[in-house]
Image (cartoon, grey):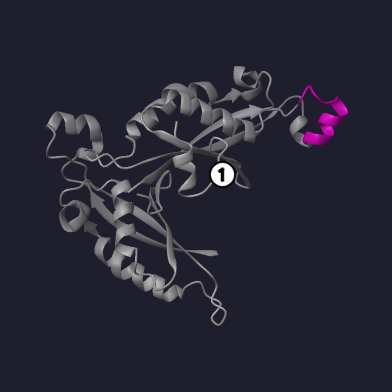
Amino acid sequence: MKAHLTRRYKFSASHRLHSPDFSPEENREMYGKCNNPYGHGHNYKVEVTVSGKPDLETGMVCNLADLDGFVNRVVMPKFEFSDLNELDTFRNLVPTTENLSRELFHLFRQEFRSAQVEKIRIEETMMNSFEYAGGWELGPAAVPQRAQG
Amino acid sequence: MVYLTRKAEFSASHFYHNPKLSPEENQRIFGKCNNPHGHGHNYTLEVTVAGEVDERSGFVMDLKKLKDLMNREVIDALDHRHLNKEVPEFRDKIPTTENLAIAIWNRLAGKLNGAKLHRVRLYETDDLFVDVYGEP
């Protein structure tokens, strides 16, 4: 039977929401406090969901040591205590948490090979969260199967 | 369709070891979890059932019946138990969170009196949980 395993991580980073497509006034109106030129920060909580049938030899969908290792080696050095706006990823992309979810999903999909990454969920604060599953609708059976490959 | 979730907690011990592998392989794959003396967790279980709301009762399912079922099939069998040594599913299977969530699904499926078992979510810690939807 298929199982969906979710591991939770956290990192702190700063960002400023500002789009060159809008005038300064429009930016202030659209992003409000988040447009403050000095930026501000969040403690992001990131949930990574991988799915598959547990391996018969190990009972695991994914060895947590591999997933934690990837996060510590690839994800944390890039994002922990970073200014998101300074990252290459966000040179031409507003670092909203919607976009951060998509970027993290693609990073895991492209570089983490030990299991099928199904979804990224990010809590920007306790009051809001964002989920991205490669553009597919969320749901039990539908997502992982259609998101294959 | 309305989804109803009931939560329960149990504590159990386990360790990860595959007798078909060498001690070195076991240590490499399972790390600290391979300690033969075992270790324990406070598991949190969330069972979600789905169904239409009954017009007379206003229920998807009588919560007391769901609670009794979870206690009988899951909590009584797993709480304060050593999963490897006392729970039949793990005689020849490693009691990972994945396999434990699947075992709980199998213990509950088909016993819900009309409501449909939608999801079993099992937290091993605050930072690790497994969802099972009964997909093959």
Q: Which residue lies furthest to the front in this view?
A: A146
- Residue B117 vertical position relative to residue A9 in the rendered view, above or below: below
Q: Where is residue A25 in the image (x, y as percent from the top left)?
A: 87, 29
The quadrant where residue A23 appears: top right
> For residue A29: magenta?
yes
**Quadrant (top left/top right/bottom left/bottom right) for the C terminus of chain A:** top left
Choose top left, top right, bottom left or bottom right for residue B75: bottom left
Residue A142 or residue B12, whichever sits in front: A142
The percent position of residue A67, horizontal first and vertical second, equals 38, 31
Q: Is residue A47 shown to the viewer in this render? A: no
Q: What stretch is highlighted in magenta?
A: A19-31
* B90 up-or-down from A27: above or below: below
| Residue A117 placement (x, y as % from top left) | 44, 34
Task: List x then y, in percent, for residue B37.
Answer: 16, 45
**Nearer-the-camera pick, A36 or B23:** B23
Identified by mark 1, the residue type is Glu
Q: Nearer the viewer, residue A33 or B121?
A: B121
Magenta: main secondary structure equals: helix
Q: Tell me the quarter of the picture where residue B119 sits.
A: bottom left
Task: Using the rendered image of the protein, determine whether residue B72 is visible from the camera's viewpoint.
Answer: yes
Q: In this view, does A111 lie above or below B9?
A: above
Asked whether B2 falls inside the magenta stretch, the response is no
Q: Which residue is drawn at 85% across and 25% down?
A: A24
The residue that disc 1 covers is: A137
